Amino acid sequence: MTRDEAWQVVCEFVKNEGLRRHMLGVEACMVAYAQRLGEDPTRWAVTALLHDFDWEIHPSAPDHPAKGEAILAERMVDEEIRRAILSHADYSGVPRKTLMEHALFACDELSGFLTACAYVKPGRSIAEVDAASVKRKLKDKGFARTVSRDDIANGAAELNLPLEEHISFCIEAMKSRAPELGLAGTAA
């Protein structure tokens, strides 16, 4: 599946602009990691874009992502990509084994948290976000309270990276696509 074909699936199933931007944010981080690690950026982009494509039709566990995986199988999406999508949900029972699976898990919650951090900055821009401020926000349990702090910490650990390095890397990846993510800010 190409990146454009994956985006067509997203557009078919996802109507919420915020959810689309979330998948684009995860994609930005995943592609950057694929390039850093010598992996296939297109394959990682497809995985990132499709990881939550079924959220609007299956908004609860265990339906998401299990029922979504069946839809992707019908569309002949590669088994490795489908397995990575299943593994991003701890409750799926599919353990993460590959680097792509670990990266998807590591980037999923963090990209959403980084978006929330950008939204509370004066200019609403990812350019205003830094790792130190993100680490402070992680300690504030009332901020973006639905984001799992454990998943963020465990994701960095699964990539064998210090949390601050993982945060900084994902901020930079998202900065590179800030307009598309709605994170370019309000300043002219």
Image: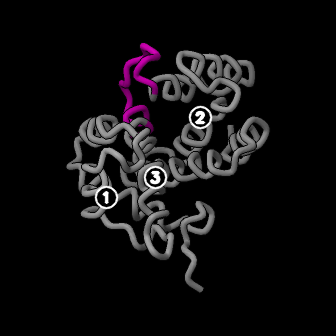
Between 12 and 63, the one nearer to me in the picture:
63
| C-alpha span from label 3 to label 1 | 16 Å
Between 175 and 77, the one nearer to me in the picture:
175
Residue 58 vertical position relative to residue 30 in the rendered view, above or below:
above
Q: Residue 54: x, y in percent?
A: 66, 29
Question: Which tag is nearer the camera, tag 2 or tag 3?
Answer: 2
Between 167 and 159, the one nearer to me in the picture:
167
Q: Which residues are magenta?
A: 89-104
Q: Residue 144: x, y in percent?
A: 42, 47
The quarter of the picture where residue 66 lies is top right
Question: Which tag is nearer the camera, tag 3 or tag 1?
Answer: 1
Q: Mark 2 highlights which residue?
A: 52
Mark 2 belongs to which amino acid? Asp
**Which residue sits at x=26%, y=55%?**
135
Which residue sits furthest bottom? 188
Can residue 5 be seen here? The reply is no
| C-alpha span from label 2 to label 1 | 24 Å
